[in-house]
Image: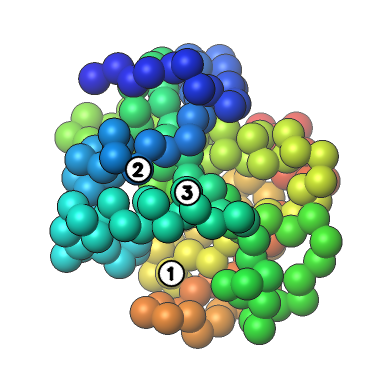
Amino acid sequence: MTARTDDIVFRYDDPVLGEFALRPVDPVGDNELLHHWVTDPKASYWMMQDASRDDVLKESQSIAAHPTHQAFLGLRNGTPDFLVERYDPHGELGAHYAHKPGDVGMHFLTAPTTRPVHGFTRAVITTVMESLFADPSVRRVVVEPDVRNTAVHALNAAVGFEVLGEVALPGKTALLSVCTRDQYLTKRGAA
């Protein structure tokens, strides 16, 4: 399945896996695909396992209407393969950490697959970090994955995230972590 590419907002070329790109989520046009992704057992940490198509549509529409929250469909070589959310962490996490100017929150989800591609998830998080730090106002990326999601903790560490500690959030205990631009660039240079 290929996706339209007329509204691409960011591109990153991975030397092995090709072009990664981001475009805004189309709440109606992408609903079937996103519903499949977020209700897949692999996406259990997104806590939408029992979501209906209408639930997913309402969530996408809510994000699209929000002034400080955006969702992007990620494409690899023109094929939808991942989802990215960018948000202001001050609102969601403000009571749990010392918010600083230039902080941006991030979530990402890779599409379910029966044929994993070596290096794909690392290329996805690299694309996400490159897109966030392409905005000169972003100084630090904040994430709050479930403490049980050890695979994403390893991935976060690989791109420079520093763990601040565990925080209780609705539906989960999260491992609050941050990555400054310098931390990311240092890890990227070491790769």
134 sits left or right of 50 in the view: right
- Does the residue at mark 2 contact the one at mark 3 (Cβ under 8 Å)? yes
Mark 2 in CB contact with mark 1 (< 8 angstroms): no
Q: Residue at x 73, y 44 (%)?
A: 184
The numbered mark, 1 or 3, whose residue comes first in the sequence reads 3
Q: Nearer the viewer, mark 1 or mark 3?
A: 3
The foreground one among 75 and 120 is: 75
Q: Earlier in the sequence, mark 2 or mark 3?
A: 2
Residue with the mark numbered 2: 27
Sequence-first tag of 2 and 1 = 2
Q: Amino acid at mark 3?
A: Ala
Name the residue that disc number 1 marks. 146
- Rendering quarter of residue 88: bottom right
Q: Position of residue 17 (x, y in %)?
A: 45, 18
Q: Nearer the viewer, mark 2 or mark 1?
A: 2
Apparent side of residue 159 relative to residue 23 in the rendered image (left or right): right
Q: Position of residue 149 (x, y in %)?
A: 40, 63
Q: Residue at x 41, y 22 (%)?
A: 76
Residue 41, position as x, y percentages in the image: 19, 56
User: What amino acid is found at the position of numbered circle 2 in the picture?
Assistant: Pro
Q: Callout 3: helix, strand or loop? A: helix
Q: Is residue 121 above or below residue 150?
A: above
- Which residue is situated farthest in the front direction here? 65
Q: What residue is shown at x 38% (from left), y 37% (from top)?
A: 26
